Amino acid sequence: MRRDIAEPQTDSECSRSMTYGFFEISKIGWALFAPETLLFLPFAVALWSVFAHRRRLALYALALGFGLVLAVGIFPLGDLLLVPLEGRYPANPPLQEVDAIIILGGGSNPAVAARWGTSGIGDAGDRYLTGGALARRFPTSVIYFTGGSGDLIGDRMSEATVAPQLLEATGVDRARVRLEGGSRSTAENAQRLRESARLQSARHIVLVTSAFHMPRAMLAFCAAGWHGLVPYPADFRSTTFGNGIGWSFAHHLQTLDIAAKEWVGLFAYRLTGRAAQSC
């Protein structure tokens, strides 16, 4: 019986050290400088100013903090950042032949699935739905799912443990699914899949991931030596600016976090050679 989840591949010690260091630094750095974290900064300054008896600075900091909260809560600022990313590749591109479909992880929460015995599908679950629809449309194609755990701490459950169940729910036969469960980032997705001889021999390959993530994914795959991939974006998030105006602080902040993280990730990938300059 075929083993569903591929074992993590062995890299050189130098490459492994560099990758793991980058992963940990990026996780810690983002936790410190994410928009949701930075929003606390004016209020922290205000609190310090009170204890330091600097009343005017405290008032300025409070005014700035409340102004930022109102701006984030009312206006879809994250959508402004998402639109250039989501518009990079067209939705529903025409396809003639498909030999393989690559679905990037990030659409489910395996910890939730393990806790409650459910699918654990998340906000980016459209990656599975889109991949499943393509698999039904091209019944001879092979589906490759790649995604381990992006958690810095915790049980680090691989998303590949729940992917077969989710894909089967969309009508995909598990026998068509190949899993890679050791990668923790987009760059590692691209690198580890390169080691699949059968996938390398496929001529027509479709890449499925969230639309906002597709530019970084394509550049990362190009940097890893992939060529001729057809981007098939899913999970679009942005709306028109006017439609997004209205009080929804949690939603707007989440969107702003996603957009900012993707732009920072794209810059960091290019800076460290994990993404090609063009593709």
Image (cartoon, rainbow, N blue to C red):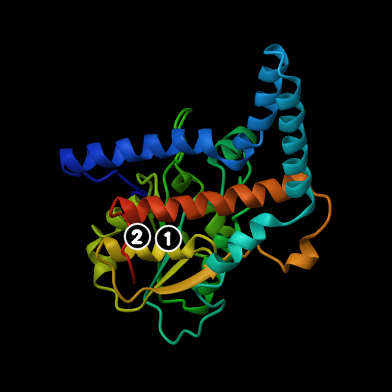
Q: Position of residue 98 (x, y in %)?
A: 40, 79
Front residue of 173/163: it is 163
Quarter of the picture holding the C terminus: bottom left
Q: Residues within 10 Å of mark 1 (few under 14, many from 20)?
A: many
| In contact (CB < 8 Å): disc 2 and disc 1 | yes
What's the distance in space between the residues labelled 2 and 1, CA to CA? Answer: 6 Å
What is the secondary structure assignment of the residue under circle 1? Answer: helix
- Residue 214 seen in the current view: yes
What is the secondary structure assignment of the residue under circle 2? Answer: helix
Residue 60, compared with residue 269, is above or below; it is: above
Count of numbered labels shown in the rendering: 2
Residue hosting label 2: 220
Residue 29, compared with residue 278, is above or below; it is: above
Side of 250 where 140 appears, left or right:
left
Q: Position of residue 125 (x, y in %)?
A: 60, 56
Residue hosting label 1: 216
Q: Residue at x 65, y 52 (%)?
A: 255
Residue 155, compared with residue 97, is above or below; it is: above
Q: Residue at x 66, y 60 (%)?
A: 79
Front residue of 77/11: it is 77
Front residue of 14/56: it is 56
Q: Position of residue 4 (x, y in %)?
A: 38, 50
Q: Quadrant of residue 130?
A: bottom right
- Residue 1 seen in the current view: no
Residue 69, compared with residue 203, is above or below; it is: above
Q: Amino acid at mark 1?
A: Arg
Q: Amino acid at mark 2?
A: Ala
Q: Residue at x 72, y 43 (%)?
A: 68
